[in-house]
Structures are given as C-alpha cells and as structure tokens.
C-alpha cells in the first residue's frame, strides 16, 4: 500500500514541477507578434504587399464614387438601395459603404505608417531595398489620402502609428493641409525613391512614373496648373517610354497583357488565385443569359452600373471607343449567329463592355482597375497646358488620344473650346474607369450636371460615416459635413 | 401458495407506502439464520434485480445477492450476531440502508422493503464540483435533472431535454438542424463578447461540447447556478456549470436493456405568403405606383408603360399562367428518426460495469439533411483492494452529419435553402417541363436566386467527427474519512468535412467548388484531490483540496479549389493539384489551478461553505497571469430547530445565502498579443504573400469577473408533498471583454479591452407537488424565472455599441433592438403635410401611401418633422419578462402520462427574414400581412399597410419595428403516454420488464409569431440577441418507443 501512496505523491510532485509558469505561457504557433517582424528586407517587402492589399479592398468600390455618382452612369435596377442612394444623392451617413470606405483607406494608411515608422532606423545593409519600400509606402499613403479628401473633404491626417488616445484627439484637418503636408510630399519623395520599371513578379507595383502621374493629377485637382504641366510633361519624354496602344480595344482585351505601354498604375486583380479576382465583370453585367453565356461569364450578374441615355446619345459617329464604352439599349445581337435577344423590362437596358471577360467563378475576374494610364496623363497634360494659356500645345496630346479613336484632330480651338473638348474627351476615353465624378467636382461642373437627379450644392463631398462621428464623439474635432446633419 | 404470499406482501407494502420493515418470524419452520425478503417499489410492484448487500460491522462479513423476478431475495446462512446492515440499490431508485439488526439463531429474519424512486427529495445526492452533497445540506443553488425527466424524450442532444425543466436555465431551441445545439443561458447574460455557454463537466472532465454524448447514457444532470457552487470552477464558472454523470453498474444480476424508438418529424409552423394571383397583382401595383410617382402615364397597356410590368405577372392576372408552386413545401419533408440502444448493467461488489451502444439516425425536415451517431460507452468500477478503488470511463463516438444551409436571405447567390424557398415566386415552377431545374436567373419577375431544390439536392456538405473521451479515477482511502483521488483523462477529437457545389446552370454556371477541412484536437487533464470528512459530535466537517492542470491543443486545416474539370468527382483529387486556397493553423491553451473547499455544519442546522480557486491561464495577458476566485455560503435549516417541531405541516424550511466570485476565460487564445494577419495580393500575374498588423495588443488582458450574491429559501410541506424553492440573485460582471469601437483612423475598428460591466438580477421559483401517490400518481413540477440585465459600463467614454440592428447602451440590457418606430402610413395628403417626412426634396422622399415613422427627436432633442438619424431609438427588447416550464406526470397502475410545457413571455425578435418577406418590391414572396394595402386616398386598405412600390420610398428599408416579430410563446415540448407490461405477463415472456411509449415532441406552439419559430437566436454573439434569419425550422416529432430489459 505504501507503494501506491508514494506513486501518488510522485505523480503529484512531477505534475506540479512540470506545470510551473512556463506551462501557462503559450506562444502563438500559427501567427507571430509584430515585434518579431519588420526586421529583414523580406519582412518589409511582405508588409508593403500587405499595404497594396489594403487598397485592393477599397478599389472594388471605386466605381460607386467615381462613376455611379456622376452623370454618365446610373443604376437602373432597384435591388441595391445603397448604390441607388449614391446615384440619386440620398445616401445616409450610416450607410456601410461610407464606413467601409473610411476603414479601408485608413487600414492602408496604418499599414504604410507602420512600415515608415519601423523602417526609419533600418540598416540599408539589412534592408537593401529600404528606399523603394519607403517610396511604395508613401505612394500608397498618398493615393489613399488623395481619395479620402476627394470623397470626404477634411479628414484626420495621421502619418505616425498612433495610440488609440492619439487617434481620438486627432481633428479633421483642412483639405489644403492634407494636400500640402502629406499627399504632395509623399508623391514627390516616392517619385525619387521608386524604381522606374518593375520586372517579373514585381510588375504591378508602384513606379516612379505612377508617382509622377498621380502628382500631376493632384496638382490639377488643386488647380496648380504650372506644376501639373511640368510633372506630366516629364512622362511624355525619355527615360519614360509610355505610349498609347494603337488599338483602343486592346486596353480592355483581358486575354492580352494588362501591363502594356499605356499602363501606369492599376490595382491588380487576377483570376483563379483563390479570391484575388475582381468583381467588376459580374458586377456591371445586365440580366441577360445569352450575353453572359456568349462571353462565358459564370456566377451571375449584378447590373450595378449602366451608362445613362444622355451619355449614350453624346457619342460621335465613328468613335472606335463607343462599342467598348457603352452598349444600349435593351437588346443584344449575337455577333456569331446574328440572333437578337430583347432584354426583360426589369433588367438594365444598357451596360459597358470595359470589364467584359470570361469569368469562371463569380467576382473572380482578371480585370484590373486602372488607376492611371497614359491616355489620362495626355488629357491631363492637355488640360494643364490649356489652363496655362498654351492652347495650341494642348491640342497635341488631346489629338493623340482623339485620333487613336479614329476621330479627326482638332485645330484652331479657343481656350474655352479646348477646355470643353478636353473634358468631353475625358468622358469618352475614360468612362467607367472611376474619373467622371471627380472631374465634375474638380472643374466645378458637378451641380449643374447633377441637380436634375437630386444633387444639392453641399454634396460635392460625401457625408462622413456616422459611426466615426459617434466614436469620436467630439464635435469640435470631428463633425459631420455641412448639409448632411 | 407462494404466489398468494407475494400478493399479500405486495398489498401490505401498498398500505404503507414509505419504507416498511418488519421483524417477525413469519415462518418458524425455516432454517435458523436465514434472511429473506421482498422488495417492491412504492406502488407495490415487485422489483427484480435489486442488489442487496449484507454487512456485519463487527466481523467485516459481507455478502451480496439480488432479487429474483418475483422480487424475492434470500441469504441462506448468516451467522447469528450483529449488528447487520442491509443495503438495497438499483437503477432509478434511491439506495436504502437498513441497519442495526441482530440475527438470532433459529429465527429467520424477513424484510419487506419498499424502494423509493429517485426524485428531487431531500436525501437525494446532488453532484457538486469535485464531490457530492445531500440536497438537504446544500448551501448553494443547484438544480438536478434525473433520468425520469429525460427518458422517453427523442432528443439527439441532452441540452434539448432541459427546455422548460430548470428554473434559471433558458434553453433556446433556435435551430432544427439535426444534431445542432440549443442555446443555453444560465441566469441571464453576463458577458458581452466572451460567450455565454456554460461549462460542461462530464464524469469529472470539463469540456465545451457534448454533441457526441448519448442522452441514454446519462444518469443525472446537475446545474450549478449560483457563484458559491460555480466558484470552484474559477475562471470557467461564470456562465454556470452543467455537471453530467453517466450511468454506472450496480451489483446484482446482469441486466440487458434494449431501448429503441422510431418517429416521424415534420415542420410545425411556416410563414403565410400571398398566393400566385395575389402576388402577381401586388407586383403589378408595385410597378404602377413607381410609374405614378415618376409622373408616367399608367392609363394604357401595362406592357407599354415607361417602366413595364413584366409579362409573367400579367399572364398570371389574365389567367394564362396558373402555376402556383410552394418552394417551401418542396424543400421540406416528413423525416424519419430512429434510435437503438443496447445496454448491459451488472457486477458484484468488486467489479461493476455499465456498457452501452447506441445508433441514432435522424433525418432533418429539410431535404438531404441527416445526423447519425454511433457511440459506445464502458464505465467500469473496480474495488482493487479494500482501500483502493478505480473508476474508468471510456466513450468513443462517431458522428456523420449531412449539413444543409438553412439560414440567410434568398437573393442572389445566397446558399440559404429556406431563404431561397421563401423568396421563390409561386408563379414560377421549380422544374422545367424537361425535368431540369428551373433557373431563377434572367427571368422577368423575380430576384435572381438559386433554385432552393437544387441547393438542397445538388450541394454536398458532409462532416464526420470521431471523439474518444476516457478518464480514470483512482480513489485511495488513507484512513476513515480521508480519501485521495487522482483523475487522469484525455479526449481526442477529430473531425473532417468536405463540401462540393457542382457547376450547373441553376447555380449560374459558377465553376464547381469543393473544399476539404479537418480539425484535430487533443485535450488532457490531471487532477489531484483530497477529501476529508469527519464528524465531531454535532460538528460535521468535509474538506477538499486539490490541484489540477488541463491543456488543449488543436490543429485545423482547410483546402479548397474551383478547378474541378467537371461534376463527376467531388473530392479534391480531381483538381490536378490546383488548390486555390489553403490554410492550416494550430492553437493551444492551458490552465493550472489550485482549489479548496470546506463544508461545515453544526447539528444539521447551521451550514457554512467556503471555497477557493486560483487559476493561471495561458490566455491571460503577461501582466495578469493568475486569478483568485473565492466563495462563501451559509444556510440555516430552520425546520430542525426545536421551536419548529410543533408545526407538523412543515417538514423542511431552509434559508440560504451565498456570495462568490467566478470568471469567464473565453477571451481567445492569443488575444493579448499583437499578432499579424497573413494576406495576399497579386503582382506579375501571380499571388504574392504579405502581412499586416492584425490586432492592437493588450498585455493587461484578463478574465471577466463575476460576483454573485444569491439568497434562497427551501420549503417542504405536507410530508414532502409540496416543495417550494425560491432564489433571488444579483450578479455583477466586471472587466467584461469589449471590442471597443475606436476611431477607424487608427487603422483598426476595435480594440479588445477589459472594460465593460453588466448587472443581472433575477428570481427563480420552483414548485413541485405530489397530488396523488397511490395507484393513481400525479405530480406537478413548475418553474418560473425572470431576470433583468443592465449594462453599467462600456468603453472609455461609454459609447453605445451598435452591432447591426442591436444596440448596447449603458442603463439598458445588452443588445436591444435599434431602429425607427413605425407609426402607420400616410393615408392622405393632409397626413403627409403633417409629417414627418423622410429625405425631403430627395428622390425617395415620402409620399402618400408610404410608411410613417415616429418623429422621436431632432436637433436640440426636439421633434423636427423630419425622419433622420435623430429618430433612431430603442425599438424593442430581445429578452423575455419571464420564462417558465411546467411538467405534469400522471399514472394509473402501469399506464403513465406526462407532458412538459415551456414558455417565454415578452421578448421580441428582429427578423432579417421579415426584411425580405415585407419588402414591397415584390421580387420575392410577400407575407400575407401586406394583403390589404393602401390603394388610394379613397381606398386606404386597412389604413396601416404600406402600398407596394417597385422602388421603395420614405425610408421603408430602414431598420424599423416593421421588421420585428413576436417572441412570446407557450410550447408543448413533449407529451408522452407510456405503458408498462404487468409483471405477470413480463415474467411469462421471461422479461424483466417491458415498457412501450408514444411521445410527441415540440407538439404545438401557441404564439403570435409570423415566422417559423418564436424561439430564435441566429447568433451566439451576446451583442446580437433575438435575431431571426430563416433559421432551420423546428420539427415536431411523433415517436413510438420500446424499452425491454432481460
């Protein structure tokens, strides 16, 4: 019996001794803590990839801000109340779209800020591509802030990794300050630190040209036309080799390489990689089985974006861009068989072909979102030149874009005519690529164009998310945009 | 002759229903020193197989036998002397010990014993943490459920049987999927984000899931409710503890029992929708109203209006299309369920065994859903030496589950079967004329959706689970009163699941997708306890000290692909190794604890209990590794005082009070650390891995703490015929884990902090009475409970937590419904002019015939004639005012009848399903509540029903009371009729006993609820209570069962 007692005692002693403090200290096996990372070159490269991913989520929504809000697009179906509210200017500040947008941009900004904070003291011998990572983080942060101020107006300007308390004490900063302190400085630095070209699996990441192109767009937006002209002009000459594709339709032929001579910066999507594809193809297709079957688009449609009748009627005869830009109205002719399908009355009657490609799984399309491409640069350059009084010079890049579309070149236009024609050319060239609404606001034309569908004068920015007004809970630091209260 | 003898004994026993013993020389011709006797139950029925042990305390003589089929036992030769004691035991009855007998030479001793069925009587043994106590000695609040409460119930999981049985335990039967767990909440809601499920302790082994447990194996469930009872479980005790013990062997004749039932299940309640003609007309008017609002001409042919009416509804209205299909009827079915149990109990004084095997097969009432369980149990008790005893439990089980997705909305690519079936318009068929599935895509008068029949029949989702639970307990008696226990146990838990969705037109031709996932967990425990009991005169002491350690490791992985070449092979073998997503992860937690408890009572009148537990857990942040959880309780048995002896109607009166501190450690395994998330992006046409910070770290993160006070009274009247228990509790939960909303500009939406505080107060009242206890037996158990939940503290600045359509606000219960209050409709222009108006001047501004909301507030807190966010308000409560249960048992001789009712009163539901059912666009089915809608100022319908509209205006889609439903109900949980074959006939058939029964489960629900089930809980998240979302409907089942033992 004694044996048994000692066995018990032994077992207990063993257990107590082996189960000390270390027994209840468990280190994560399937994740690591932040402090173990941001050390090596590879760590920073992975963190940069994480930052691109932050923008990726947001750019799935870009069409709602850039296109649906504008006058060239609308949503005809009535099953998507949030999108309808964007379209007809009745969006509630509690709408999840606004909250998610705010969150997506600040997630990307925080990731960039974390890289910038942790890379500052990194040894270049260890982090060999230090400059490049700084450039990428600043570029992505600038893109995020640029979108934020264009969508919401004044926003919280954060460039460090703040504590919760610091964030809660950060006010909405005037737009001009955000441009001056963050967006322009970031892009200027990125334009120095980023590589000029990427190769191999790095194709698709930010380049010097992307930074300069975005900078041009920023200057144009804040109406600093001389600086816009200067930076955009750089992109038209060596060492840059950007050029328009000879065939406009190739831009939207996804069987071809999307990183062509006209590509400057896209948000990248790819099919068949387990959720890295885009929603655009399914999202914009109308409810027409024959059409979906013909283009081999599986998984359904969302009918979320349709060209307006006004826009369709605006197109000039002979414009080679029309068929890929807009399709209207209410019927479709099968190019192979000639059979005509008439759409149901409750279906979108018009649609764009810009994102049409075969899709095997719903919302897993290979179609990228083009943030900036060379035709955009040329049209911006034309606009800047014209505003700087160089109207004749402005017609050169404008006509480059125009003649590619098979239209006759302009000659002898006045400054006002040029201004109007650049704006019109932007609509034809860049429709459904996320530009129209921002162009309208930038040029002060939004209210006149959109008052008929419900826009009020204060609606050049969206309401800030109600949740943020509530969580900040301090009207002195953070109040709703005027008119939305 | 012998038969008459027995009969007279039985009659004798009947006349004296309490324990009878008789010392007499009934038959002087018998041999000297013989002891014999007869055992009956208190109905006078003879009990066979009762174990009888005789002991002589002086000589240590022990002998055992058991009663024969006539209930008779005998010991042929017992030496004279004494004192002798006799212990009688058998399953389902309380043990009886008769002691103090002397045996005289030549005089036979005859005993007549009447066994009492186990019930919630005072001497009943109650299982408490790490030990047992007599009910009369309890100082805390512990409810017990025994075999008689749960037998005959065709439940797949034992938690279902608790519905309506126990005060203070709210059982929500929210999900009818076979094998799914009901939601159990003990004494209110004490946590906001760390879960509310109680801790389960099966044969001493703490676990969180009892899906694999065979209900037929269960001997008792004891529910520890107050903190003095749960504090011994420390940081896992604050949601209450359910202790489950399984059946064990008894000495005596081997008893083989076959228990089987077969039944049919069908849906009990379905929502009522417009028929095809009504729906088509509704559609027509929704388009018409939209045209009118846009200023379009609606005088001509509807097919030529600016916004055309689709052809299908026009055909229905003109009588050309007479299709009227109910997709819901098509996906629901009458489903069989069957269960087979074989068990063997027996043993001698050295080794006792309980062996059982189970096969359960339950089809679900949605096509293609099924749950099967195979389980085996071996419980062995062995007395190795006089001092050393071991108990061993081994329980392997295997589950196969065919899952279907019921919950969710119906539109688009939703895979919700009920959502799609309640959306599919009645004027479209489910099959095309050629037998293929009808495709709800690109059709004119319906939202696009997956054909619900195809969802049920074509998708595969099968999971299997193997679980082996084993533990062994060695008990060593050091000296009289001191026992050492070592318990070692382990459970291995492996599950595997695979899904496949083929590529079909009916699923919009999306590429076939399949997944394969596996879970493997291992959990072990070592527990050392010492128990000491000693009586010093009138001072009675029981003490416990112990040390325990438990560790859990689990691995998960999942692979999926959409690269299937065709639909022929559904496993990932077919994807040519092109896996599109895959992940694997491992997580661990561990806990070490010291525990102690002392129970003291003086003279059985004054009781004191104190307990202590110290937990260290891997889940706690570095700065807070250990927590201490003490408790104390007192009780006074007033009825045993001298001054009470003159009051004969009171047999027991006890007052109890307790206080204790417990915790909730479900805070995530690594939540205190700043871990990262792995994410990917594509560049250069390939996927590139990356990472990003995942959480804001919190090294102070720790358990949630609950402090609970409980006061109770137990009253027994009329010799045990009426028992009343009442308890009142106040609990304060502090350091509640909150995902505090932080400014998104920080890069994170929320941060996990120990910051919240919630208070629960409640009453529980239990009444059990025995109305008749003769040949007629009738007893009633009634319980009613109420609790009030109040948030005391939230976040650093006390901000509301808004989660979907629930709000958690200081001063209110957790997760109240938040939205707009509907105030009818605008019947005419005059009413519209009075407002309030939604989105004045905007495209969807309110018009006549639209919904009217209450103008709750505006700028400066005053109503402003506008409907906007200022009018958002608390619009209802998901919590009942009270809930109750009633059980009646009635028997006459061998015929038994019982029923159980559960009810809940005063709760409301926010229904995500109703948002679709009552959407006025008519693209999916519309509820009959919308039938009598506003048509014109002259014909406003019933004056409260919104007009149909293709593009709803006036804020109709805003969360409002329009989408709320009634959560009150009275449900007849169970009605059972049973018959026991008379002993005479059983014996002729050489059976020990035979029972047959018929039982109706979830027989009927009285409710004003408009949907499937008023007892909803779509989410286990405390922040989102009372949400309905087309959850799997509850079936009614009618079963017949047979219980035979040999």
Image (cartoon, coloured by chain):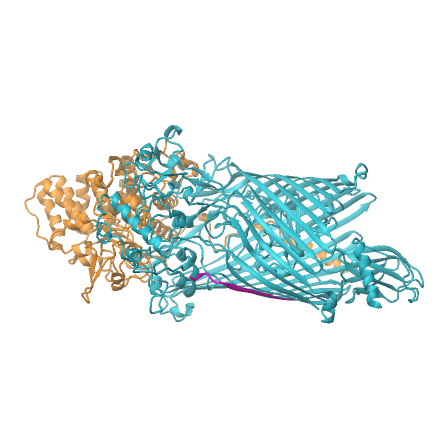
In the image, A126: left or right of B610? left
Identify which residue is drawn at 42% across, 70% down: B573
Looking at the rendered image, the quarter that the N terminus of chain B falls into is bottom right
Question: Chain A rendered in what hue?
Answer: orange
- Where in the figure is residue B690, as x and y percent of width and height? 38, 54
Residue A16 is at least partly visible in this image = no
> Could you tell me residue B250's position as x and y percent?
74, 62
Q: Is residue B339 magenta?
A: yes
Front in this rendered view, residue A143 or A68: A68
- Residue B932 visible (yes or no): yes
| Residue A129 locus on image (x, y percent) | 33, 51
Residue B658, located in which quarter of the rendered image?
Answer: top right
Highlighted magenta segment, given as a residue range: B330-342
Q: What percent of the width, then of the height, locates residue B726? A: 66, 41
The residue lying toward the viewer, choosing from B573 and A480, is A480
Is residue B133 shown above or below B709?
A: below
Instruction: Considering the whole magenta stretch, tell me its main secondary structure.
Output: strand
Name the residue: 56% across, 44% down: B703
Is B994 positioned to the left or the right of B194 in the image?
A: right
Instruction: Report the quarter where the C terminus of chain B lies.
Output: bottom right
- State the image quarter where residue B375 is shown: bottom right
What color is chain B drawn in? Answer: cyan
- Is A241 magenta? The answer is no
Q: Which of B282 and A380 is in front in this view?
A: B282
Relative side of B556 to B765, left or right: left
Residue furthest toward the left? Answer: A412
């Amino acid at each position: 019996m004694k044996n048994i007692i000692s066995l018990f005692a032994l077992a207990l002693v063993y257990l107590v001794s082996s189960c000390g403090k270390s027994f209840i200290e468990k280190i994560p096996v399937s994740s690591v803590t932040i402090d173990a990372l941001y050390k090596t070159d590879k760590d920073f490269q992975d963190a940069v990839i994480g930052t691109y991913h932050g923008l990726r989520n947001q750019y799935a929504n870009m069409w709602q801000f850039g296109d649906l809000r504008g006058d060239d697009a609308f949503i005809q179906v009535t099953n998507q109340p949030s999108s309808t509210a964007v379209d007809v200017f009745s969006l509630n500040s509690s709408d999840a779209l606004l909250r998610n947008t705010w969150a997506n941009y600040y997630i990307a900004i925080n990731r960039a800020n974390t890289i910038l904070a942790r890379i500052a003291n990194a040894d270049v011998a260890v982090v060999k591509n230090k400059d490049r990572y700084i450039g990428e983080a600043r570029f992505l942060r600038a893109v995020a802030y640029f979108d934020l101020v264009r969508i919401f107006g004044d926003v919280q300007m954060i460039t460090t990794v703040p504590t919760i308390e610091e964030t809660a004490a950060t006010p909405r900063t005037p737009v001009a300050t955000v441009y001056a302190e963050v967006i322009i400085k970031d892009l200027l630095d990125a334009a120095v630190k980023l590589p000029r070209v990427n190769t191999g699996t790095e194709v698709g990441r930010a380049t010097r040209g992307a930074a300069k192109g975005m900078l041009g767009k920023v200057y144009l937006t804040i109406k600093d036309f001389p600086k816009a002209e200067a930076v955009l002009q750089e992109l038209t000459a060596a060492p840059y080799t950007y050029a328009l594709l000879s065939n406009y339709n190739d831009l939207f032929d996804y069987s071809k390489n999307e990183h062509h001579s006209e590509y400057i910066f896209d948000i990248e999507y790819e099919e068949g990689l387990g959720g890295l594809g885009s929603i655009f193809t399914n999202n914009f297709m109308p409810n027409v089985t024959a059409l979906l079957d013909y283009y081999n688009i599986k998984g359904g449609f969302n009918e979320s974006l349709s060209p307006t009748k006004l826009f369709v009627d605006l197109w000039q005869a002979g414009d080679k861009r029309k068929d890929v830009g807009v399709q209207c109205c209410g019927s479709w002719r099968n190019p192979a068989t000639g059979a005509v399908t008439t759409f149901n009355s409750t279906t979108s009657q018009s649609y764009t072909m810009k994102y049409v490609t075969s899709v095997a799984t719903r919302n897993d399309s290979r179609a990228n979102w083009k943030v900036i491409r060379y035709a955009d640069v040329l049209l911006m350059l034309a606009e800047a030149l014209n505003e700087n009084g160089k109207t004749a010079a402005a017609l050169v890049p404008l006509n480059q874009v125009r003649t590619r579309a098979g239209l006759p070149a302009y000659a002898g236009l006045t400054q006002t005519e040029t201004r109007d024609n650049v704006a019109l050319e932007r609509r034809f060239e860049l429709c459904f690529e996320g530009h129209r609404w921002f162009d309208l606001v930038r040029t002060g034309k939004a209210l006149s164009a959109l008052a008929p569908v419900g826009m009020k004068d204060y609606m050049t920015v969206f309401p800030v998310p109600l949740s943020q007004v509530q969580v900040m809970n301090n009207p002195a630091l953070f109040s709703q945009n005027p008119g939305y209260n | 002759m012998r038969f008459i003898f027995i009969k007279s004994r039985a009659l004798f026993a009947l006349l004296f229903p309490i324990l009878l013993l008789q010392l007499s020389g009934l038959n002087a011709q018998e041999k000297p020193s013989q002891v014999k006797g007869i055992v009956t139950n208190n109905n006078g029925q003879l009990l066979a197989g009762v174990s009888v042990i005789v002991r002589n305390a002086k000589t240590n003589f022990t002998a055992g036998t058991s009663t024969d089929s006539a209930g008779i036992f005998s010991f042929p030769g017992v030496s004279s002397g004494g004192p002798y004691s006799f212990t009688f035991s058998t399953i389902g009855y309380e043990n009886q010990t008769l002691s103090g007998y002397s045996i005289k030479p030549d005089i036979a001793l005859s005993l007549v014993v009447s066994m009492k069925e186990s019930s919630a009587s005072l001497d009943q043994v109650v299982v408490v943490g790490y030990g047992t106590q007599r009910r009369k000695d309890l100082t805390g609040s512990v409810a017990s459920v025994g075999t008689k409460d749960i037998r005959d119930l065709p439940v797949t999981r034992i938690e279902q049987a608790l519905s309506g049985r126990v005060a203070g335990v709210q059982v929500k039967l929210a999900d009818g999927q076979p094998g799914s767990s009901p939601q159990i909440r003990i004494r209110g809601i004490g946590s906001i984000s760390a879960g509310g499920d109680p801790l389960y302790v099966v044969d001493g082994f703490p676990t969180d899931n009892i899906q694999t447990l065979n209900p037929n194996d269960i001997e008792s469930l004891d529910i520890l409710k107050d903190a003095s009872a749960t504090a011994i479980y420390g940081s896992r005790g604050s949601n209450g503890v359910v202790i489950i013990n399984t059946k064990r062997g008894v000495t005596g004749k081997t008893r083989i029992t076959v228990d089987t039932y077969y039944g049919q299940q069908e849906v009990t309640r379905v929502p009522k929708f417009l028929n095809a003609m009504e729906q088509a007309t509704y559609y027509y008017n929704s388009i018409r109203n939209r045209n009118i609002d846009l200023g379009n001409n609606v005088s001509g042919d509807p097919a030529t209006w600016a916004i055309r009416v689709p052809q299908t509804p026009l055909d229905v209205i003109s009588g050309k299309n007479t299709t009227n299909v109910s997709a819901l009827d098509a996906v629901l079915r009458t489903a069989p369920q069957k269960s087979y149990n074989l068990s063997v109990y027996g043993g001698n004084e050295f080794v006792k065994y309980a062996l059982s095997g189970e096969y359960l097969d339950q089809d679900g009432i949605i096509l293609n859903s099924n749950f099967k369980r195979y389980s085996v149990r071996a419980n062995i008790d062995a007395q190795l030496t006089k001092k050393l005893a071991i108990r061993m439990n081994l329980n392997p089980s295997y589950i196969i589950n065919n899952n279907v997705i019921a919950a969710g909305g119906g539109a688009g690519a939703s895979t919700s079967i009920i959502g799609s079936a309640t959306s599919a318009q009645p004027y479209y068929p489910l099959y095309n004329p050629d037998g293929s599935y009808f495709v709800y895509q690109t059709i004119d008068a319906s939202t696009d959706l997956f054909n619900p029949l195809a969802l049920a029949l074509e998708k595969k989702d099968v999971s299997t689970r193997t679980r082996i639970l084993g533990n062994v307990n060695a008990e060593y008696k050091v000296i009289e009163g001191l026992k050492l226990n070592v318990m070692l146990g382990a459970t291995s838990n492996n599950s595997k699941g695979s899904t496949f969705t083929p590529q079909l037109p009916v699923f919009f031709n999306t590429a076939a997708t399949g997944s394969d996932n596996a879970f493997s967990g291992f959990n072990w425990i070592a527990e050392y306890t010492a128990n000491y009991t000693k009586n010093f005169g009138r001072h009675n002491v029981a003490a416990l000290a112990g040390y325990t350690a438990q560790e859990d490791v689990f691995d998960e992985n999942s692979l999926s692909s959409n690269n299937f070449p065709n639909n022929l092979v559904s496993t990932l073998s077919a994807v040519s190794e092109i896996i599109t997503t895959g992940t694997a992860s491992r997580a661990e937690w561990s806990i070490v604890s010291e525990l102690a408890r002392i129970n003291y009572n003086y003279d059985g009148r004054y009781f004191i209990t104190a307990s202590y537990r110290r937990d260290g857990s891997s889940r706690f942040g570095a700065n807070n590794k250990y927590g201490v959880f003490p408790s104390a309780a007192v009780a006074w048995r007033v009825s045993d005082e001298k001054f009470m002896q003159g009051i004969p109607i009171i047999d027991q009166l006890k007052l109890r009070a307790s206080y204790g501190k417990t915790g909730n450690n479900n805070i995530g395994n690594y939540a205190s650390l700043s871990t990262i998330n792995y994410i990917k992006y594509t560049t250069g046409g390939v996927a590139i891995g990356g990472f990003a910070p995942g959480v804001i770290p919190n090294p102070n993160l720790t358990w949630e703490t609950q402090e609970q006070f409980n006061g109770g009274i137990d009253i027994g009247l009329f010799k045990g015929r009426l028992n009343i228990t009442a308890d009142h509790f106040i609990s304060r939960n502090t350091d509640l884990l909150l995902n505090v909303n932080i400014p998104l500009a920080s890069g994170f939406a929320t941060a996990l902090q120990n910051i919240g505080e919630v208070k629960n107060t409640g009453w529980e009242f239990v009444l059990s009475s025995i109305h008749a206890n003769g040949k007629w037996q009738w007893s009633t158990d009634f319980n009613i409970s109420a609790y009030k939940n109040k948030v005391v503290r939230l976040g650093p600045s006390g901000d509301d937590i808004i989660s979907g359509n629930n709000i958690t606000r200081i001063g209110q219960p957790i997760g109240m419904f938040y939205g707009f209050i509907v105030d009818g409709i605008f019947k005419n222009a005059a009413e519209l002019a009075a407002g309030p108006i939604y989105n004045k001047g905007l495209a969807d501004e309110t018009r006549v015939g639209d919904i009217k909301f209450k103008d709750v507030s505006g700028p400066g807190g005053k109503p402003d004639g506008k409907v906007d966010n200022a009018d958002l308000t608390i619009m209802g409560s998901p919590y009942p005012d009270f809930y109750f249960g009633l059980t009646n048992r009635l028997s006459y001789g061998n015929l038994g009848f019982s029923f159980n009712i559960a009810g809940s009163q005063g709760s409301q539901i926010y229904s995500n399903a109703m948002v679709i059912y009552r959407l006025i666009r008519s693209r999916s089915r519309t509820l009959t509540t919308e039938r009598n809608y506003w048509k014109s100022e002259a014909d406003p319908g019933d004056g409260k029903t919104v007009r149909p509209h293709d593009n709803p205006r006036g804020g109709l889609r805003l969360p409002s009371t329009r989408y709320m439903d009634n959560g009150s109900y009275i449900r007849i949980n169970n009605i059972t009729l049973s018959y026991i074959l008379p002993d005479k006939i059983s014996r002729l058939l050489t059976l020990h006993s035979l029972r047959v029964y018929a039982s109706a489960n979830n027989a009927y629900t009285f409710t004003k609820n408009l949907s499937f089930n008023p007892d909803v809980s779509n989410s286990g998240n405390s922040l989102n209570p009372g949400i309905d979302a087309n959850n799997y409907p509850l079936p009614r089942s009618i079963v017949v069962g047979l219980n035979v033992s040999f």
